Amino acid sequence: MRSMLLRKISIKELIFTKYKEKKMTCVTSSSSDIAAAATLLLEGKLVAFPTETVYGLGANALSEEASVRIYQVKGRPPTDPLICHVPDATDILGRLWDISTPENREVAEVGCALGAKFWPGPITFVGPASSLVAPCVTGGCGCVGVRIPDHPVALEFLKACGVPVAAPSANTFGHVSPTCAAHVMSDLAPRDSSLTVIDGGSSSIGIESTVVKLTHNGSAVQLEILRRGKIGVTELQRALKAVMREKSGDDNKQQFREALVTVRDTRSKFLGNMSAPMDGPGQLLTHYSPNVPSFLLTRSSISLLVQSSTSTTSGTTSRSGSVVAGEVRYPLSRAVLLDFEHRIVNAMGSSAPSSTPTPVAVSPTASGCPFAAESDNNTTHSSAQGIVLARMSLSDSGSLEEACQRVFEALRWVETIAGAEVAIFPLLSEWVPRVEANEQRGITEEAADAANELLAAVEDRLFRAASGVVARVEIS
Ligand code: TXA
Ligand code: MG
């Protein structure tokens, strides 16, 4: 244990020494370091800071020159807009969102009323941009996303800055979003020697905010979820109805009946037509990609070509296999597997994989998550484990919150495995059945919706990391 601790410390020190040489600075979250970092941001430098979702790469959102650096350092297309981070709602109306027309004012007011229900928190509302926002921050789309993060270090830093801070996730364009300071340093130190990173530990949620665009259709404000996150469509729909009710005081008003939340479904669009044009920024199919060819697995992806396994004299099972993606065949012994509980590895070890998902025991009290751990079949688990090069479970206990918190860390871990030729991940909804509300078992509709939507948000990240491509696994 002690030697493991020493090893961890020395690896961290090595990373810090390596980046110190490149003059990039990683500072603590002490008040003096935060104040110094805010001064650097106001001088036009970039500062990466922790949030509850992922780390952001910040610049003064009122300065075109400073904000343009974000695009250069990330290698991000100039048409992909940035989110503005503020410590409170004081300056949103008029300063970030335009309120010069009645429709824009209504959109901005509904945005702020929704923000009052969710902020500080993991949700970004996109509304009409005021002319004070640096043009590059909007990517030329005329609207700007706003978020108040729920993280003490981020809030202290934003207060110290005193200006809105434009910040995308602090990774290189297309790579995995960072959930700790070391991730930021490994992506960005080689690209910006004057970058400062505030180390605030690991992000507690682990995936980026829900992004919601507000528009006006002439009679009512409409909401469209552009990116799924921890706050789901049902929760948002409930909040929108409450806001409309508070505004009109009457459920039968036209406005209330038209209150609508939709989800931009890029996934089915891509599956239907892989060459479909982008109809919005940041909607790329390929995102979060590790530097190893990556594929999704469904339950029916796995074929056991021999029904009974071959036992060696030591009693362990000897199996081999391939990951097959189109014309390309990779040895399974060179595959890195991200699992959920032990579902995939068990399916690989089972002599009769089922094409229907295993039912899960659902309990709202078990580990605070409606997905209770499935009983672990250790025999099949251990017999199949040796056939892949390396395996990590997003959650051993079947906790979706844990899978959410670990998914980006896990995608980066894939890149550290020497000799890896291919990575395989679960298409989660094929491995974990939907949670249904169940009064007798104390599962409310809200808990079921929240669980199903968190699963969709985590699945979205794995789906994009594998560019939506499903592979086959053949085991003999
Ligand atoms: O949790 C988060 O949202 C993190 C932390 C740092 O706050 N930020 C983040 O930013 O993930 P970024 O830039 O990596 O992702 C924001 C997404 C992009 O897909 C972008 O295209 C979209 O939100 N977005 C931002 N502003 C937009 C706008 N004005 N209109 C449409 N989409 C927008
Ligand atoms: Mg990003």
Image (spheres, grey):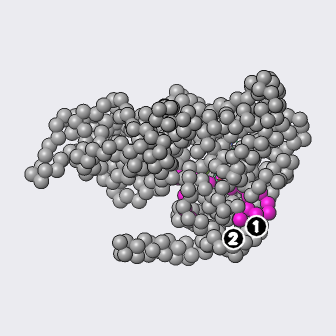
- Considering every residue shown, the one lying at the far left of the view is 313
Q: Which residues are drawn in magenta?
A: 156-181
Looking at numbered disc 1 in the image, what kind of residue is underneath it? Ala
Q: Residues within 10 Å of mark 1 (few under 14, many from 20)?
A: some
Which secondary structure type mostly characterizes the magenta part of the structure? loop
What is the x, y in percent for residue 187? 55, 61
- The residue drawn where x is 33% and y is 54% is 390
Q: Is residue 57 left or right of residue 316?
A: right
The mark nearer the N terminus, 1 or 2, is 2
- The residue drawn where x is 43% and y is 71% is 8
Q: Are marks 1 and 2 in contact (CB under 8 Å)?
A: yes
> Which element type, helix, strand or loop, lies under badge 1?
helix
- Considering every residue shown, the one lying at the far front of the view is 440
Residue where numbered disc 2 is placed: 34
- The residue drawn where x is 55% and y is 33% is 445
> Which element type, helix, strand or loop, lies under badge 2?
helix
What is the x, y in percent for residue 466? 46, 42
Could you tell me if residue 247 is visible in this image?
yes
Is 2 rendered above or below residue 422? below
Is 266 rendered above or below residue 139? above
Toward the viewer: 461 or 70? 461
Residue where numbered disc 1 is placed: 160
What is the x, y in percent for residue 87? 74, 58
What is the x, y in percent for residue 455? 50, 40
